[in-house]
Image: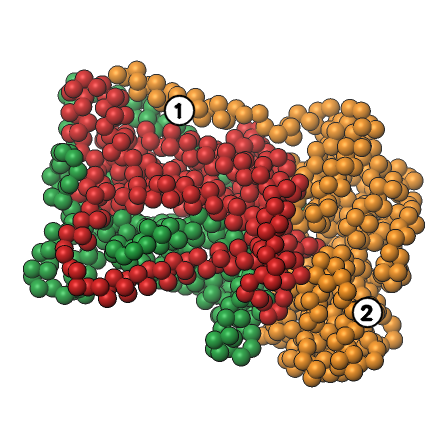
Chain colours: A green, B red, C orange
Amino acid sequence: MAVQDFTTRTAGSGSGSGSGSGEERTTPGALPRRVRTGHRLRALEPLLWLGPALVLILAVVIWPVVEMVRTSLMDISSTGLTRGFAGGANYADLFAEPDLPGVVLRTLVWVVGVVTVTLTVSLALAQLLNSRFPGRRMVRWALIVPWAASVLMTALTWRWMLNNFYGVVNRVLMDVGILDKPVNWLAHPAQAFAWMMAVAVFVSLPFTAFVILSGLGTIPAEVYEAARLDGAGTARTYLSVTLPLLRPSLLVAAIINVINVFNSFPVIWAMTRGGPGFATDTTTTYMYKLAFDNQAVGESAAMAVVNFALILLVVLVYLRVVRGREETG
Amino acid sequence: MSAVTARSTTAPSATVRRRRPLRLRTVLLTAVGWLTALIFLAPYLQMLLTALKPTPELMKSPPSYLPSQWEWSNFADVWSLKDPPVPDALLFSLYVAGMSTLLALAVGLPAAYYTARHRFRGRGAFLLLVLVTQMFAPTALLVGIYREMVSLDLTDTAEGLILVNAAFNLPFCIWILNAYFASIPKELEEAAFMDGAGRLGAMVRVTLPLALPGVVTALVYTFIGAWNEYVVALTITSSGDRTTLTKAIPGFVTAYQEQWQYLFATSLIAIVPVVVLFIFVERYLISGLTAGGIK
Amino acid sequence: MKRHLIGIAAGVTLALVLSGCGKGGSSGDSDSDGKTIRFVAAKYDDDTQPYWDKLIKTFEAENPGYQVELEVVDWEQLDSKVKTYIQTGQQPDVLNYNKFSDFARDDLIYQAKDVVSPKVLDDFLPLFADQAQYEGVQYGLPFISSARLFFYNKDIFDKAKISKPPSSWAEVEDAAEKVKKAGDIPLGLPLGAEEAQAEFYIWAMNNGGGWTDKSGKWTVDQQANVETLDFLRKLTKAGLTQPNPEATNRKDVFNQFAQGKIGMINGAVFMRKGFIDTVDKNLNYGVAPLPSKDGTTHNTLGVQDYLVAFKKDEGKNREAVNKFLDFFYQKENASKFLSTEGFLSVTKSAGDALSSDASYYKPFVDALSGARFAPTDNPNWSAVEGAVKQRIGTAVSSAEPEKVLGEIQETAEKDG
């Protein structure tokens, strides 16, 4: 299983830059493992350590998941009352929805688009925050605000700012002379979707930028020194030294973002509610609308299951990439 | 490379070199930096300005940039409302987020430590479980969560919320802490153990402090997650005195009445504690996330 | 050393167990005595919670031993909450909602006669009681009602030199052209998801269209409805509405009307309290009947919300529910709610008790007598309503009216 090496395989890049107060260092990449003789691990010991976590995860996360899968196989009336077993009927209904292909496609665009842009911008942001300039701390603090604010609030604010009548975005654009009359930004599906992707990027940037920023912090100065001695320019140094060394951070940022962006509900819900029609829905908001607008609770659960299948697929791809890295690296 | 080093390297890489002549670069960086800050703060600035507008001005078209009259009383109004009771909601949110964080750490630390230090049967499976459960968002699981809370008789309690928040953030905690512990050389702990500290003492006195940035990261992540959690609070709590801030906020805008100034004022009240928390721990956070990066 | 390890693990487990043992809400044990009931109320505005708090306090004082646990939920979140409750068997005893028939179909709620006294039952205005029936039996308890009329801004009309509010569609179009020339937004047309079904129905019913025929069969795709959408589409394309009706919610145009930016609009009775008074108490507006195609008969849209009482514990909760509902429907209590929230009465007694502001409310009350209602007595209405909210707006922008109505008709004919 690829996950086994989840942790212990530490990237072997940053050795020798230790400047702390007399810590010993292991050889990079070595497994810090020396099973003490006299202490056979009792079979039950792991349970003591992992037990509480397992209980919490199984009881609070897995139980509802099972429940959801069960619901997707049930015939549920519009009031929410369970009327019996439905077999695959909910899935059949779901796949017969004319809007589904568009929704899935849009979800794909949404995830790939938002994550790619987030990562790219975060690389630049991290570079900026890693440089020294007056007020850097302040800028870092400013960057945290979108993370600290709940996504729902941020999305509501953006909807407010983009409003056709009283939105400040139109006001600014008209005052600078770019527009001569207000644009109803969130009314046209393509335009609205682009704005929502922008907002999704906006709220994902802080976390991502900080992950990459801390990744930058682990790259020892010596590496850059060496690159400089080799006569590499700034751009080349970045591409051939910095970026490869950032790969582990990027992978973490990517996977967390994929999961979050995929599940992101508040941005779309607060800004367009997936409308007009289903023209700006992703699978997550569509799932919600199936249950509460179409009154099809079972079908909605089926959508949720399909949603998980999709995201699981993405994570499997991720694991492959990670394993690929470990084999080549 | 261990996180141990990470804490100290940020500064040197830039300072060691003496590049005085590059004044222009600093000026540019500063300009770009401050502009970035402004962009990130802009929506919240707009929030503040809207929260300070008098009611008739809120939806004026075209909008005014600044309030014609600064209605600081909006904040006072919000603070003294009976429905929702904002100060109570603030305390309740703090309690839930705080306890969720504690629980997630209390449960996550041993698990992460053990998986990082020992090889055992089922370790891979456990880590896979952790990774997979990270993918579940409560939005899709509401009915299941609610049914479970009914079975445990935890509907409409802080404890129910705490359990859910802790559990859904636990995978990330374990993930990040595990990576962090793994990056701390075991020899350090061994040495302390030899000195007679005892296994646990060694862990608490040596490993834990070194892992502090990782702990802080897990802490911040869980706290922010729990602080901003909305759908579960909406579903499983019902009494007025068990209302979280996030649950209270959308109530200002209903089909029959819109009070955006209150909504934004309360939102700002909700943001402040997290930003303050962050400012205190920012230094640790950056090196903490590194461990995740190592993985 | 082992002991320490065990200690940590045990401690953590203990913490877990302890936190798991916190005493839950009283939902569990309250049912047993049948004297404590749960009431989920919809939040209309800020005054809703204080109203119920006070009412319940009085009720509990007058009926020692009885208790009402109140939960006030915003409309936006009520649907999801109600479904979750029912799906998990945790329905409240009394619910304030805008639908009832699918509860009746699924045999979840009491008949009206089982939970209110004959006196209260008699007091409901027949107009509303009729709309609360499922298969000929009254289940829903009419709670509040609202009616729509045509609001117009007198200042804008003066500026555009329009002497009287339009009565026919042709006059609407004509007036709109004039307002547009004068530089204001002519007509507010909210076909966004929030309340699209109401806005569409208002226009459709005044063209002889609607949701069902006399026998109750769905006729969403009838010609009169297509014509209605064609007309609205024409207005939209000619720029006689606010931009993008398909993405505009009711609240937005109500607000802009209150700001004096919109010339005319189909407004609701709560416009004044919820929107106009908060922005501009001196707004110079008039209220007229809703324009119809030919300008002769004018129908209005009636909307009512209900109280429903859920069956629980083999009827053990019935007595307490009955007491509470009878208490609420007392003249002074029911009329207090209406005047607090700015709605119209559904009972004779409360209607009589409401005299304040008669001049504002009178036209609405008068219009109500001929009001048409959405087919809330049909259990499939919830799904149809959802489909209408999602789709109808697209018929004035991108999609063809026939196609949109056809899709909704299909939804309607599916079994709920």
Q: Residues within 10 Å of mark 2 (few under 14, many from 20)?
A: some
Q: Is residue C132 visible?
A: no
Kind of residue sitting beneath label 1 = Val
Q: Which chain carries label 2?
A: C
C61 or A38: which is nearer to us?
C61
Identify the residue at horizontal 18%, vertical 21% (top origin): B193
Query: x, y percentage for residue C406?
Result: 65, 69
Labelled pair 2, 1 in contact (Cβ < 8 Å)? no
Kind of residue sitting beneath label 2 = Gly
Quadrant of the snapshot with the N terminus of chain B: top left
Q: Please report whichever mark, 2 or 1, sits nearer to the chain's N-terminal start.
A: 1
Q: Picture quarter containing residue C383?
A: bottom right
Query: x, y percentage for residue C199?
Result: 72, 66
C374 or C199: which is nearer to us?
C199
Q: Is residue C172 left or right of residue B30?
A: right
Both marks 2 and 1 on one chain: yes
A150 or A98: which is nearer to us?
A150
Identify the residue at horizontal 58%, vertical 36% (top origin): B88
How far apart marks 2 and 1 lie (CA) works out to 68 Å
Residue assigned mark 2: C286
Identify the residue at horizontal 59%, vertical 70% (top origin): B62
Identify the residue at horizontal 37%, vertical 50% (top origin): A141
Quadrant of the snapshot with the C terminus of chain B: top left
Residue assigned mark 1: C12
State which mark lies toward you, 2 or 1.
2
Q: In what element is the residue under mark 1?
A: helix
Q: In this view, does C382 lie to the left or right of C354?
A: left
